[in-house]
Image: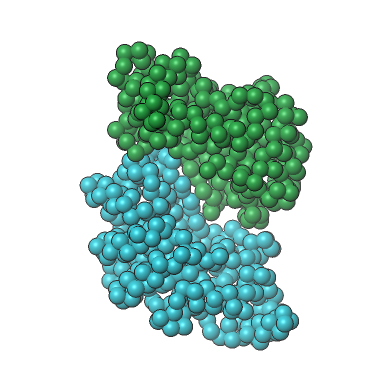
Chain colours: A green, B cyan
Protein backbone atom coordinates (compact mmCIF):
# COMPACT_ATOMS: atom_id res chain seq x y z
CA UNK A 1 0.00 0.00 0.00
CA UNK A 2 2.72 2.53 0.86
CA UNK A 3 5.17 2.18 -1.93
CA UNK A 4 6.43 5.75 -2.03
CA UNK A 5 8.88 7.45 0.30
CA UNK A 6 9.71 11.14 0.11
CA UNK A 7 12.79 12.71 1.68
CA UNK A 8 12.83 16.49 2.20
CA UNK A 9 16.56 17.07 2.44
CA UNK A 10 16.77 20.55 3.90
CA UNK A 11 15.28 24.03 3.87
CA UNK A 12 18.17 25.84 2.17
CA UNK A 13 17.14 27.40 -1.14
CA UNK A 14 18.56 29.94 -3.59
CA UNK A 15 15.10 31.54 -3.61
CA UNK A 16 12.96 33.03 -0.84
CA UNK A 17 9.55 32.97 -2.50
CA UNK A 18 6.74 34.87 -0.84
CA UNK A 19 4.49 31.79 -1.21
CA UNK A 20 6.89 29.09 0.03
CA UNK A 21 5.12 26.44 2.12
CA UNK A 22 8.37 25.74 3.98
CA UNK A 23 9.57 29.35 4.22
CA UNK A 24 12.81 28.23 2.58
CA UNK A 25 15.54 30.75 1.79
CA UNK A 26 19.31 31.10 1.31
CA UNK A 27 19.60 31.73 5.06
CA UNK A 28 17.60 28.65 6.10
CA UNK A 29 19.67 25.96 7.73
CA UNK A 30 17.04 23.53 8.96
CA UNK A 31 18.02 20.07 7.82
CA UNK A 32 18.27 16.49 8.97
CA UNK A 33 21.78 15.45 9.85
CA UNK A 34 23.66 14.25 6.75
CA UNK A 35 24.72 11.01 8.37
CA UNK A 36 21.09 10.36 9.36
CA UNK A 37 19.92 11.06 5.79
CA UNK A 38 22.51 8.61 4.40
CA UNK A 39 21.34 5.92 6.81
CA UNK A 40 17.68 6.66 6.04
CA UNK A 41 18.20 6.48 2.27
CA UNK A 42 20.05 3.16 2.65
CA UNK A 43 17.21 1.84 4.77
CA UNK A 44 14.59 2.92 2.22
CA UNK A 45 16.63 1.56 -0.70
CA UNK A 46 16.98 -1.87 0.91
CA UNK A 47 13.22 -2.10 1.46
CA UNK A 48 11.64 -4.22 -1.25
CA UNK A 49 8.18 -2.81 -0.54
CA UNK A 50 9.21 0.66 -1.64
CA UNK A 51 9.01 1.34 -5.38
CA UNK A 52 9.55 5.08 -5.53
CA UNK A 53 11.99 7.31 -3.65
CA UNK A 54 11.57 11.07 -4.07
CA UNK A 55 13.90 13.87 -3.06
CA UNK A 56 12.91 17.45 -2.49
CA UNK A 57 13.90 20.36 -0.26
CA UNK A 58 14.52 23.30 -0.14
CA UNK A 59 16.45 23.22 -3.36
CA UNK A 60 18.15 19.83 -3.64
CA UNK A 61 20.53 20.81 -6.45
CA UNK A 62 22.21 23.44 -4.24
CA UNK A 63 24.26 20.69 -2.62
CA UNK A 64 24.62 18.59 -5.74
CA UNK A 65 27.54 16.46 -4.44
CA UNK A 66 25.33 15.34 -1.55
CA UNK A 67 22.35 14.67 -3.83
CA UNK A 68 24.61 12.54 -6.03
CA UNK A 69 25.87 10.68 -3.00
CA UNK A 70 22.27 9.76 -2.12
CA UNK A 71 21.43 8.80 -5.71
CA UNK A 72 24.52 6.58 -5.65
CA UNK A 73 23.13 4.81 -2.56
CA UNK A 74 19.77 4.19 -4.27
CA UNK A 75 21.15 3.22 -7.68
CA UNK A 76 21.88 -0.51 -7.20
CA UNK A 77 18.31 -1.08 -5.95
CA UNK A 78 16.60 -0.12 -9.23
CA UNK A 79 13.99 2.08 -7.59
CA UNK A 80 12.03 4.69 -9.46
CA UNK A 81 13.61 8.00 -8.40
CA UNK A 82 11.88 11.36 -8.67
CA UNK A 83 13.25 14.83 -7.97
CA UNK A 84 11.68 18.25 -7.41
CA UNK A 85 13.62 21.44 -8.16
CA UNK A 86 13.12 25.09 -9.01
CA UNK A 87 15.47 24.63 -11.95
CA UNK A 88 17.94 27.44 -11.09
CA UNK A 89 20.76 25.31 -12.50
CA UNK A 90 19.23 25.42 -15.98
CA UNK A 91 20.88 28.80 -16.60
CA UNK A 92 24.07 26.98 -17.60
CA UNK A 93 23.50 24.84 -20.69
CA UNK A 94 26.62 22.81 -20.03
CA UNK A 95 25.58 22.07 -16.46
CA UNK A 96 22.05 21.19 -17.61
CA UNK A 97 23.34 18.56 -20.04
CA UNK A 98 25.59 17.11 -17.34
CA UNK A 99 22.74 16.92 -14.83
CA UNK A 100 20.49 15.19 -17.36
CA UNK A 101 23.24 12.70 -18.20
CA UNK A 102 23.64 11.96 -14.53
CA UNK A 103 19.89 11.77 -13.88
CA UNK A 104 19.71 9.16 -16.62
CA UNK A 105 22.57 7.25 -15.01
CA UNK A 106 20.80 7.35 -11.64
CA UNK A 107 17.45 6.15 -13.05
CA UNK A 108 15.74 9.44 -12.31
CA UNK A 109 12.36 8.75 -13.81
CA UNK A 110 10.74 12.13 -13.21
CA UNK A 111 11.96 15.66 -12.61
CA UNK A 112 9.28 18.09 -11.50
CA UNK A 113 10.11 21.74 -11.93
CA UNK A 114 8.33 24.18 -9.61
CA UNK A 115 8.14 27.51 -11.39
CA UNK A 116 5.63 30.37 -11.47
CA UNK A 117 5.38 34.10 -10.84
CA UNK A 118 6.52 33.54 -7.25
CA UNK A 119 9.74 31.83 -8.32
CA UNK A 120 10.41 34.23 -11.18
CA UNK A 121 12.30 36.88 -9.17
CA UNK A 122 14.83 34.21 -8.13
CA UNK A 123 15.09 31.91 -11.14
CA UNK A 124 15.39 33.24 -14.68
CA UNK A 125 12.89 31.89 -17.15
CA UNK A 126 15.81 31.05 -19.50
CA UNK A 127 16.87 28.42 -16.98
CA UNK A 128 13.47 26.73 -17.21
CA UNK A 129 13.45 26.98 -20.98
CA UNK A 130 16.90 25.36 -21.13
CA UNK A 131 15.80 22.48 -18.93
CA UNK A 132 12.67 21.83 -20.96
CA UNK A 133 14.60 21.91 -24.23
CA UNK A 134 17.40 19.74 -22.88
CA UNK A 135 14.86 17.17 -21.68
CA UNK A 136 14.07 16.39 -25.34
CA UNK A 137 17.51 14.83 -25.70
CA UNK A 138 17.05 12.67 -22.58
CA UNK A 139 13.69 10.91 -22.84
CA UNK A 140 14.27 8.66 -19.80
CA UNK A 141 13.72 11.49 -17.31
CA UNK A 142 10.18 12.81 -17.79
CA UNK A 143 10.05 16.51 -16.96
CA UNK A 144 6.86 18.20 -15.80
CA UNK A 145 6.05 21.70 -14.62
CA UNK A 146 4.05 22.52 -11.48
CA UNK A 147 2.90 26.09 -10.93
CA UNK A 148 1.45 27.58 -7.74
CA UNK A 149 -1.02 30.30 -8.65
CA UNK A 150 -3.29 32.92 -7.08
CA UNK A 151 -5.97 35.13 -8.60
CA UNK A 152 -3.47 37.84 -9.55
CA UNK A 153 -0.56 35.53 -10.29
CA UNK A 154 -1.90 33.02 -12.79
CA UNK A 155 1.49 32.73 -14.53
CA UNK A 156 -0.06 32.94 -17.99
CA UNK A 157 2.69 35.24 -19.22
CA UNK A 158 5.26 32.69 -18.10
CA UNK A 159 3.51 29.96 -20.08
CA UNK A 160 3.53 32.25 -23.08
CA UNK A 161 7.21 33.11 -22.60
CA UNK A 162 8.14 29.44 -22.26
CA UNK A 163 6.82 29.09 -25.82
CA UNK A 164 7.90 25.98 -27.71
CA UNK A 165 10.01 24.79 -24.81
CA UNK A 166 7.00 23.29 -23.00
CA UNK A 167 5.75 21.26 -25.94
CA UNK A 168 5.18 17.71 -24.72
CA UNK A 169 5.65 18.78 -21.07
CA UNK A 170 2.81 18.25 -18.59
CA UNK A 171 1.92 21.54 -16.95
CA UNK A 172 -0.32 21.75 -13.88
CA UNK A 173 -1.40 24.89 -12.07
CA UNK A 174 -2.24 24.42 -8.40
CA UNK A 175 -4.18 26.92 -6.31
CA UNK A 176 -1.96 28.27 -3.56
CA UNK A 177 -2.89 27.28 0.00
CA UNK A 178 -2.45 29.64 2.96
CA UNK A 179 0.38 27.71 4.62
CA UNK A 180 4.00 28.64 5.38
CA UNK A 181 4.96 32.01 3.91
CA UNK A 182 1.74 32.06 1.89
CA UNK A 183 -0.15 32.84 5.11
CA UNK A 184 1.02 36.41 4.56
CA UNK A 185 -0.61 36.64 1.15
CA UNK A 186 -3.88 38.57 1.07
CA UNK A 187 -6.74 36.20 1.72
CA UNK A 188 -8.79 37.30 -1.31
CA UNK A 189 -6.00 35.95 -3.53
CA UNK A 190 -6.71 32.29 -2.80
CA UNK A 191 -8.86 30.40 -5.26
CA UNK A 192 -11.46 28.45 -3.32
CA UNK A 193 -12.41 26.01 -6.02
CA UNK A 194 -13.79 23.25 -3.78
CA UNK A 195 -16.94 23.31 -1.69
CA UNK A 196 -17.81 21.56 1.54
CA UNK A 197 -20.85 20.19 -0.27
CA UNK A 198 -18.62 18.25 -2.72
CA UNK A 199 -18.81 15.15 -0.54
CA UNK A 200 -16.60 13.04 -2.82
CA UNK A 201 -13.75 15.51 -2.42
CA UNK A 202 -13.76 15.27 1.38
CA UNK A 203 -11.21 12.46 1.30
CA UNK A 204 -7.44 12.56 1.68
CA UNK A 205 -6.05 12.48 -1.87
CA UNK A 206 -2.98 10.43 -0.93
CA UNK A 207 -1.05 8.83 1.84
CA UNK A 208 2.70 8.73 1.49
CA UNK A 209 5.57 8.46 3.97
CA UNK A 210 7.43 11.77 4.03
CA UNK A 211 10.65 12.37 5.98
CA UNK A 212 10.72 16.08 6.63
CA UNK A 213 13.84 18.12 7.27
CA UNK A 214 12.62 19.05 10.76
CA UNK A 215 12.92 15.39 11.76
CA UNK A 216 9.20 14.61 11.67
CA UNK A 217 7.62 11.93 9.50
CA UNK A 218 4.39 12.98 7.82
CA UNK A 219 1.66 10.86 6.24
CA UNK A 220 1.54 12.82 2.97
CA UNK A 221 3.46 15.40 0.94
CA UNK A 222 0.88 18.18 0.78
CA UNK A 223 2.35 21.58 1.70
CA UNK A 224 -0.47 21.77 4.25
CA UNK A 225 0.62 18.76 6.31
CA UNK A 226 3.85 20.30 7.58
CA UNK A 227 1.84 22.87 9.50
CA UNK A 228 -0.09 20.11 11.31
CA UNK A 229 0.59 17.82 14.26
CA UNK A 230 0.17 14.70 12.12
CA UNK A 231 3.64 13.44 12.95
CA UNK A 232 4.37 9.71 12.74
CA UNK A 233 7.86 9.89 14.28
CA UNK A 234 8.36 7.94 17.52
CA UNK A 235 12.10 7.43 17.58
CA UNK A 236 15.18 8.17 15.51
CA UNK A 237 15.70 4.50 14.72
CA UNK A 238 12.09 4.00 13.58
CA UNK A 239 11.86 1.64 10.60
CA UNK A 240 9.77 2.29 7.49
CA UNK A 241 7.63 -0.74 8.48
CA UNK A 242 6.92 0.69 11.90
CA UNK A 243 5.91 4.00 10.31
CA UNK A 244 3.53 2.24 7.92
CA UNK A 245 2.15 0.19 10.83
CA UNK A 246 1.54 3.38 12.78
CA UNK A 247 -0.27 4.92 9.85
CA UNK A 248 -2.40 1.78 9.59
CA UNK A 249 -3.20 1.27 13.24
CA UNK A 250 -3.74 4.88 14.30
CA UNK A 251 -7.46 5.50 14.75
CA UNK A 252 -7.22 9.07 13.43
CA UNK A 253 -5.83 7.92 10.09
CA UNK A 254 -8.20 4.97 10.05
CA UNK A 255 -11.19 7.32 10.28
CA UNK A 256 -9.64 9.68 7.74
CA UNK A 257 -9.30 6.85 5.24
CA UNK A 258 -12.59 5.15 6.01
CA UNK A 259 -14.97 8.06 6.65
CA UNK A 260 -13.13 10.94 5.08
CA UNK A 261 -13.02 14.44 6.53
CA UNK A 262 -16.83 14.58 6.71
CA UNK A 263 -16.68 12.61 9.97
CA UNK A 264 -14.33 15.14 11.62
CA UNK A 265 -16.25 18.09 10.20
CA UNK A 266 -19.51 16.73 11.65
CA UNK A 267 -17.99 16.23 15.10
CA UNK A 268 -16.55 19.75 14.97
CA UNK A 269 -19.75 21.40 13.78
CA UNK A 270 -22.03 19.52 16.19
CA UNK A 271 -20.13 20.02 19.45
CA UNK A 272 -19.57 23.26 21.35
CA UNK A 273 -15.98 22.60 22.45
CA UNK A 274 -14.91 23.06 18.81
CA UNK A 275 -16.34 26.56 18.51
CA UNK A 276 -12.85 27.95 17.89
CA UNK A 277 -12.47 25.90 14.72
CA UNK A 278 -13.99 27.45 11.67
CA UNK A 279 -14.39 25.07 8.75
CA UNK A 280 -14.67 27.18 5.60
CA UNK A 281 -17.49 26.54 3.13
CA UNK A 282 -15.04 26.85 0.26
CA UNK A 283 -11.33 26.08 0.07
CA UNK A 284 -8.49 25.62 -2.40
CA UNK A 285 -7.84 22.00 -1.41
CA UNK A 286 -9.13 19.47 1.10
CA UNK A 287 -5.56 19.59 2.50
CA UNK A 288 -6.49 23.06 3.65
CA UNK A 289 -9.32 21.64 5.77
CA UNK A 290 -6.99 18.94 7.11
CA UNK A 291 -4.58 21.70 8.09
CA UNK A 292 -7.28 23.65 9.92
CA UNK A 293 -8.43 20.60 11.91
CA UNK A 294 -5.06 19.09 12.81
CA UNK A 295 -2.91 22.18 13.13
CA UNK A 296 -2.54 21.86 16.90
CA UNK A 297 -2.49 19.25 19.66
CA UNK A 298 -5.46 20.87 21.37
CA UNK A 299 -7.78 20.06 18.46
CA UNK A 300 -6.53 16.48 18.30
CA UNK A 301 -7.02 16.11 22.08
CA UNK A 302 -10.57 17.41 21.79
CA UNK A 303 -11.32 14.95 18.99
CA UNK A 304 -9.86 12.00 20.90
CA UNK A 305 -12.95 11.05 22.96
CA UNK A 306 -15.03 10.96 19.76
CA UNK A 307 -12.40 8.87 18.01
CA UNK A 308 -12.30 6.48 20.99
CA UNK A 309 -16.07 6.16 20.86
CA UNK A 310 -15.80 5.36 17.13
CA UNK A 311 -13.09 2.81 17.91
CA UNK A 312 -15.24 1.10 20.53
CA UNK A 313 -18.05 0.90 17.98
CA UNK A 314 -15.69 -1.08 15.74
CA UNK A 315 -15.01 -3.75 18.37
CA UNK B 1 3.76 -6.25 -22.42
CA UNK B 2 0.74 -5.04 -24.39
CA UNK B 3 -1.79 -4.22 -21.72
CA UNK B 4 -3.60 -1.39 -23.48
CA UNK B 5 -6.17 -1.63 -26.23
CA UNK B 6 -7.57 1.40 -28.02
CA UNK B 7 -10.79 1.38 -30.04
CA UNK B 8 -11.39 4.22 -32.51
CA UNK B 9 -15.15 3.99 -32.85
CA UNK B 10 -15.86 6.08 -35.92
CA UNK B 11 -14.93 9.21 -37.83
CA UNK B 12 -18.14 11.16 -37.23
CA UNK B 13 -17.53 14.38 -35.29
CA UNK B 14 -19.44 17.57 -34.54
CA UNK B 15 -16.29 19.46 -35.53
CA UNK B 16 -14.28 19.57 -38.75
CA UNK B 17 -10.99 20.93 -37.48
CA UNK B 18 -8.45 22.06 -40.03
CA UNK B 19 -5.76 20.08 -38.17
CA UNK B 20 -7.64 16.79 -37.65
CA UNK B 21 -5.38 13.77 -38.06
CA UNK B 22 -8.38 11.67 -39.15
CA UNK B 23 -10.14 14.34 -41.24
CA UNK B 24 -13.22 13.78 -39.09
CA UNK B 25 -16.36 15.86 -39.66
CA UNK B 26 -20.15 15.81 -39.27
CA UNK B 27 -20.36 14.28 -42.74
CA UNK B 28 -17.85 11.48 -42.05
CA UNK B 29 -19.39 8.05 -41.90
CA UNK B 30 -16.36 5.78 -41.77
CA UNK B 31 -16.82 3.37 -38.91
CA UNK B 32 -16.46 -0.26 -37.96
CA UNK B 33 -19.71 -2.18 -38.00
CA UNK B 34 -21.50 -1.80 -34.65
CA UNK B 35 -21.96 -5.54 -34.22
CA UNK B 36 -18.24 -6.02 -34.90
CA UNK B 37 -17.36 -3.34 -32.30
CA UNK B 38 -19.57 -5.04 -29.68
CA UNK B 39 -17.88 -8.38 -30.34
CA UNK B 40 -14.44 -6.76 -30.26
CA UNK B 41 -15.09 -4.98 -26.96
CA UNK B 42 -16.38 -8.23 -25.41
CA UNK B 43 -13.27 -10.01 -26.64
CA UNK B 44 -10.97 -7.33 -25.19
CA UNK B 45 -12.90 -7.22 -21.90
CA UNK B 46 -12.61 -10.97 -21.39
CA UNK B 47 -8.85 -10.87 -21.92
CA UNK B 48 -7.09 -10.92 -18.56
CA UNK B 49 -3.87 -9.58 -20.07
CA UNK B 50 -5.48 -6.27 -20.95
CA UNK B 51 -5.59 -3.68 -18.17
CA UNK B 52 -6.72 -0.57 -20.02
CA UNK B 53 -9.39 -0.13 -22.69
CA UNK B 54 -9.60 3.29 -24.36
CA UNK B 55 -12.28 4.69 -26.62
CA UNK B 56 -11.84 7.51 -29.06
CA UNK B 57 -13.20 8.61 -32.42
CA UNK B 58 -14.27 10.89 -34.07
CA UNK B 59 -16.31 12.21 -31.22
CA UNK B 60 -17.46 9.28 -29.10
CA UNK B 61 -20.09 11.21 -27.15
CA UNK B 62 -22.07 11.95 -30.34
CA UNK B 63 -23.58 8.46 -30.15
CA UNK B 64 -23.73 8.34 -26.37
CA UNK B 65 -26.20 5.39 -26.19
CA UNK B 66 -23.72 3.26 -28.14
CA UNK B 67 -20.78 4.41 -26.01
CA UNK B 68 -22.76 3.46 -22.89
CA UNK B 69 -23.56 0.09 -24.38
CA UNK B 70 -19.84 -0.56 -24.81
CA UNK B 71 -19.01 0.71 -21.31
CA UNK B 72 -21.70 -1.67 -20.02
CA UNK B 73 -19.92 -4.57 -21.75
CA UNK B 74 -16.59 -3.63 -20.14
CA UNK B 75 -17.95 -2.83 -16.68
CA UNK B 76 -18.04 -6.30 -15.06
CA UNK B 77 -14.38 -6.87 -15.96
CA UNK B 78 -13.00 -4.06 -13.79
CA UNK B 79 -10.72 -2.67 -16.47
CA UNK B 80 -9.29 0.81 -16.38
CA UNK B 81 -11.32 2.73 -18.96
CA UNK B 82 -10.15 5.94 -20.62
CA UNK B 83 -12.03 8.23 -23.00
CA UNK B 84 -11.00 11.02 -25.37
CA UNK B 85 -13.45 13.76 -26.36
CA UNK B 86 -13.57 17.32 -27.63
CA UNK B 87 -15.97 18.16 -24.77
CA UNK B 88 -18.80 19.62 -26.91
CA UNK B 89 -21.32 18.13 -24.44
CA UNK B 90 -19.98 20.34 -21.62
CA UNK B 91 -22.17 23.21 -22.85
CA UNK B 92 -25.09 21.73 -20.86
CA UNK B 93 -24.33 21.70 -17.13
CA UNK B 94 -27.04 19.16 -16.45
CA UNK B 95 -25.76 16.81 -19.12
CA UNK B 96 -22.18 17.25 -17.86
CA UNK B 97 -23.13 16.15 -14.35
CA UNK B 98 -25.01 13.14 -15.71
CA UNK B 99 -22.06 12.10 -17.87
CA UNK B 100 -19.67 12.38 -14.94
CA UNK B 101 -22.01 10.32 -12.76
CA UNK B 102 -22.12 7.67 -15.45
CA UNK B 103 -18.37 7.78 -16.07
CA UNK B 104 -17.90 7.10 -12.36
CA UNK B 105 -20.33 4.20 -12.58
CA UNK B 106 -18.44 2.78 -15.55
CA UNK B 107 -15.01 3.07 -13.87
CA UNK B 108 -13.83 5.68 -16.34
CA UNK B 109 -10.45 6.45 -14.87
CA UNK B 110 -9.38 9.19 -17.25
CA UNK B 111 -11.11 11.60 -19.59
CA UNK B 112 -8.80 13.44 -21.95
CA UNK B 113 -10.21 16.59 -23.50
CA UNK B 114 -8.74 17.66 -26.84
CA UNK B 115 -9.16 21.39 -27.14
CA UNK B 116 -7.16 24.21 -28.71
CA UNK B 117 -7.46 27.01 -31.27
CA UNK B 118 -8.33 24.43 -33.92
CA UNK B 119 -11.30 23.07 -31.97
CA UNK B 120 -12.46 26.50 -30.81
CA UNK B 121 -14.66 27.31 -33.85
CA UNK B 122 -16.67 24.14 -33.16
CA UNK B 123 -16.71 23.80 -29.37
CA UNK B 124 -17.38 26.74 -27.09
CA UNK B 125 -14.83 27.37 -24.39
CA UNK B 126 -17.67 27.44 -21.82
CA UNK B 127 -18.19 23.74 -22.50
CA UNK B 128 -14.57 23.01 -21.57
CA UNK B 129 -14.77 25.24 -18.50
CA UNK B 130 -17.92 23.41 -17.36
CA UNK B 131 -16.27 20.02 -17.73
CA UNK B 132 -13.16 21.07 -15.82
CA UNK B 133 -15.24 22.58 -13.00
CA UNK B 134 -17.59 19.61 -12.85
CA UNK B 135 -14.62 17.24 -12.60
CA UNK B 136 -13.89 18.69 -9.15
CA UNK B 137 -17.04 17.02 -7.84
CA UNK B 138 -16.11 13.64 -9.34
CA UNK B 139 -12.54 12.85 -8.34
CA UNK B 140 -12.59 9.26 -9.67
CA UNK B 141 -12.39 10.39 -13.30
CA UNK B 142 -9.14 12.30 -13.78
CA UNK B 143 -9.55 14.95 -16.45
CA UNK B 144 -6.64 16.25 -18.48
CA UNK B 145 -6.33 18.64 -21.40
CA UNK B 146 -4.34 17.97 -24.56
CA UNK B 147 -3.75 20.81 -27.00
CA UNK B 148 -2.41 20.57 -30.54
CA UNK B 149 -0.44 23.70 -31.36
CA UNK B 150 1.45 25.39 -34.17
CA UNK B 151 3.67 28.46 -34.22
CA UNK B 152 0.74 30.83 -34.75
CA UNK B 153 -1.79 28.85 -32.75
CA UNK B 154 -0.21 28.32 -29.36
CA UNK B 155 -3.59 28.45 -27.58
CA UNK B 156 -2.25 30.74 -24.85
CA UNK B 157 -5.38 32.87 -24.90
CA UNK B 158 -7.46 29.73 -24.37
CA UNK B 159 -5.39 28.82 -21.33
CA UNK B 160 -5.93 32.32 -20.02
CA UNK B 161 -9.67 32.18 -20.72
CA UNK B 162 -9.99 28.82 -19.00
CA UNK B 163 -8.81 30.65 -15.87
CA UNK B 164 -9.45 28.90 -12.56
CA UNK B 165 -11.21 26.01 -14.27
CA UNK B 166 -7.91 24.29 -15.14
CA UNK B 167 -6.48 24.38 -11.62
CA UNK B 168 -5.33 20.88 -10.77
CA UNK B 169 -5.77 19.74 -14.40
CA UNK B 170 -2.78 18.42 -16.34
CA UNK B 171 -2.34 20.42 -19.53
CA UNK B 172 -0.04 19.31 -22.33
CA UNK B 173 0.63 21.09 -25.59
CA UNK B 174 1.71 18.88 -28.48
CA UNK B 175 3.32 20.14 -31.66
CA UNK B 176 1.04 19.44 -34.60
CA UNK B 177 2.27 16.87 -37.11
CA UNK B 178 1.62 17.16 -40.85
CA UNK B 179 -0.79 14.22 -41.08
CA UNK B 180 -4.48 14.02 -42.04
CA UNK B 181 -6.04 17.45 -42.59
CA UNK B 182 -2.96 19.06 -41.05
CA UNK B 183 -1.05 18.28 -44.27
CA UNK B 184 -2.81 21.37 -45.67
CA UNK B 185 -1.39 23.63 -42.98
CA UNK B 186 1.51 25.80 -44.10
CA UNK B 187 4.76 23.96 -43.51
CA UNK B 188 6.44 26.82 -41.65
CA UNK B 189 3.81 26.44 -38.91
CA UNK B 190 5.12 23.13 -37.62
CA UNK B 191 7.43 23.22 -34.62
CA UNK B 192 10.40 20.99 -35.34
CA UNK B 193 11.60 20.53 -31.80
CA UNK B 194 13.48 17.26 -32.27
CA UNK B 195 16.69 16.71 -34.20
CA UNK B 196 17.98 13.69 -36.05
CA UNK B 197 21.10 14.00 -33.94
CA UNK B 198 19.11 13.35 -30.73
CA UNK B 199 19.90 9.64 -30.92
CA UNK B 200 17.96 8.77 -27.76
CA UNK B 201 14.75 10.12 -29.28
CA UNK B 202 14.99 7.90 -32.36
CA UNK B 203 12.91 5.21 -30.67
CA UNK B 204 9.20 4.48 -30.88
CA UNK B 205 7.66 6.09 -27.78
CA UNK B 206 5.04 3.40 -27.32
CA UNK B 207 3.50 0.28 -28.72
CA UNK B 208 -0.21 -0.22 -28.20
CA UNK B 209 -2.88 -2.22 -30.03
CA UNK B 210 -5.24 0.20 -31.78
CA UNK B 211 -8.41 -0.87 -33.59
CA UNK B 212 -9.04 1.86 -36.12
CA UNK B 213 -12.41 2.70 -37.61
CA UNK B 214 -11.18 1.81 -41.11
CA UNK B 215 -10.86 -1.81 -39.97
CA UNK B 216 -7.07 -1.81 -39.65
CA UNK B 217 -5.19 -2.63 -36.46
CA UNK B 218 -2.26 -0.34 -35.75
CA UNK B 219 0.70 -0.83 -33.41
CA UNK B 220 0.35 2.57 -31.70
CA UNK B 221 -2.04 5.48 -31.29
CA UNK B 222 0.05 8.29 -32.74
CA UNK B 223 -1.89 10.39 -35.26
CA UNK B 224 0.97 9.65 -37.64
CA UNK B 225 0.48 5.87 -37.74
CA UNK B 226 -2.90 5.95 -39.48
CA UNK B 227 -1.22 7.39 -42.56
CA UNK B 228 1.19 4.44 -42.71
CA UNK B 229 1.02 0.87 -43.94
CA UNK B 230 1.83 -0.54 -40.49
CA UNK B 231 -1.34 -2.59 -40.36
CA UNK B 232 -1.49 -5.69 -38.15
CA UNK B 233 -4.86 -6.92 -39.40
CA UNK B 234 -4.88 -10.37 -41.06
CA UNK B 235 -8.51 -11.42 -40.66
CA UNK B 236 -11.75 -10.19 -39.19
CA UNK B 237 -11.71 -12.89 -36.52
CA UNK B 238 -8.14 -12.11 -35.48
CA UNK B 239 -7.67 -12.44 -31.70
CA UNK B 240 -5.86 -9.92 -29.52
CA UNK B 241 -3.24 -12.60 -28.83
CA UNK B 242 -2.60 -13.15 -32.52
CA UNK B 243 -2.21 -9.39 -32.97
CA UNK B 244 0.31 -9.20 -30.14
CA UNK B 245 2.13 -12.23 -31.55
CA UNK B 246 2.30 -10.53 -34.92
CA UNK B 247 3.72 -7.40 -33.36
CA UNK B 248 6.33 -9.53 -31.58
CA UNK B 249 7.35 -11.77 -34.42
CA UNK B 250 7.36 -9.24 -37.25
CA UNK B 251 10.96 -8.36 -38.14
CA UNK B 252 10.08 -4.74 -38.93
CA UNK B 253 8.75 -4.12 -35.42
CA UNK B 254 11.55 -6.17 -33.92
CA UNK B 255 14.14 -3.88 -35.51
CA UNK B 256 12.10 -0.80 -34.57
CA UNK B 257 12.11 -1.87 -30.90
CA UNK B 258 15.66 -3.17 -30.80
CA UNK B 259 17.57 -0.72 -33.01
CA UNK B 260 15.21 2.23 -33.12
CA UNK B 261 14.64 4.34 -36.23
CA UNK B 262 18.37 4.96 -36.64
CA UNK B 263 18.68 1.55 -38.33
CA UNK B 264 16.04 2.41 -40.95
CA UNK B 265 17.41 5.92 -41.43
CA UNK B 266 20.90 4.54 -42.08
CA UNK B 267 19.63 2.03 -44.64
CA UNK B 268 17.67 4.79 -46.36
CA UNK B 269 20.50 7.30 -46.38
CA UNK B 270 23.15 4.81 -47.52
CA UNK B 271 21.35 3.18 -50.42
CA UNK B 272 20.39 4.76 -53.74
CA UNK B 273 16.99 3.06 -54.13
CA UNK B 274 15.68 5.22 -51.27
CA UNK B 275 16.53 8.51 -52.96
CA UNK B 276 12.85 9.46 -53.02
CA UNK B 277 12.65 9.38 -49.22
CA UNK B 278 13.77 12.55 -47.55
CA UNK B 279 14.39 12.19 -43.84
CA UNK B 280 14.18 15.68 -42.33
CA UNK B 281 16.95 16.92 -40.04
CA UNK B 282 14.34 18.30 -37.65
CA UNK B 283 10.80 17.18 -36.90
CA UNK B 284 7.97 17.66 -34.45
CA UNK B 285 7.96 14.02 -33.31
CA UNK B 286 9.73 10.80 -34.15
CA UNK B 287 6.26 9.58 -35.23
CA UNK B 288 6.68 11.99 -38.12
CA UNK B 289 9.80 10.14 -39.26
CA UNK B 290 7.98 6.81 -38.83
CA UNK B 291 5.21 8.18 -41.02
CA UNK B 292 7.66 9.25 -43.74
CA UNK B 293 9.37 5.86 -43.84
CA UNK B 294 6.33 3.59 -43.65
CA UNK B 295 3.73 5.64 -45.49
CA UNK B 296 3.61 3.28 -48.46
CA UNK B 297 4.11 -0.36 -49.37
CA UNK B 298 6.84 0.55 -51.84
CA UNK B 299 9.12 1.79 -49.05
CA UNK B 300 8.45 -1.29 -46.94
CA UNK B 301 9.17 -3.54 -49.95
CA UNK B 302 12.45 -1.73 -50.57
CA UNK B 303 13.44 -2.17 -46.92
CA UNK B 304 12.55 -5.86 -46.89
CA UNK B 305 15.85 -7.27 -48.28
CA UNK B 306 17.76 -5.30 -45.62
CA UNK B 307 15.43 -6.54 -42.90
CA UNK B 308 15.85 -10.12 -44.14
CA UNK B 309 19.60 -9.72 -44.04
CA UNK B 310 19.29 -8.44 -40.45
CA UNK B 311 17.06 -11.40 -39.62
CA UNK B 312 19.56 -13.88 -41.02
CA UNK B 313 22.23 -12.24 -38.90
CA UNK B 314 20.14 -13.09 -35.86
CA UNK B 315 20.01 -16.82 -36.61
Task: Please indicate whether residue A255 sits to the left or right of residue A29 in the image.
Answer: left
Residue at x 29%, y 52% (from the top left corner)? B102
Q: Quadrant of residue A67?
A: top right
Q: Residue most toward the front?
A: A315
Residue A175: percent from left, percent from top: 44, 34
**Residue B81 image point, x, y percent:** 40, 57
Residue at the spot x=40%, y=27% of the render?
A: A311
- The residue closer to the viewer here, A225 or B75, is B75
Please state, as top left, top right, bottom left or bottom right, where the C terminus of chain A lies in the image. Answer: top left
Asked where in the image residue B20 lies, by quadrant, the reply is bottom left
Residue in view at x 45 percent, y 60 percent: B52
Percent coordinates x, y for residue B70 in the rendering: 31, 64
Q: Is residue B97 visible?
A: yes
Q: Is residue B24 visible?
A: no
- Left/right placement of residue A29 relative to residue B299 reads right
- Counting the numbered discs, the total is 0
Q: Work out whether residue A11 or residue B74 is closer to the camera in this orientation and state it.
A: B74
Q: Which residue sits at x=53%, y=53%?
A: A167
B233 lies above or below B21: below
Left or right: A35, with A215 as reference point: right
Judged left or right of residue B62, residue B2 is right
Coordinates of residue A173 in the picture (x, y in percent): 47, 39
Amino acid sequence: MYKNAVVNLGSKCNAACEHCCFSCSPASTESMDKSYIRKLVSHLSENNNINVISFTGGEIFLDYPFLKELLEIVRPYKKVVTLISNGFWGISSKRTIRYFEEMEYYNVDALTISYDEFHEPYVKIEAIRNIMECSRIFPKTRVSLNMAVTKDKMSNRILEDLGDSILGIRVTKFPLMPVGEAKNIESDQFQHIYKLSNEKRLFCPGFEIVYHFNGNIYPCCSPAVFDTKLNLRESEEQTFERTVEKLHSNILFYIMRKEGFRWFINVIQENPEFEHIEIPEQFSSICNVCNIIFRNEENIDLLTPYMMEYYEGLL
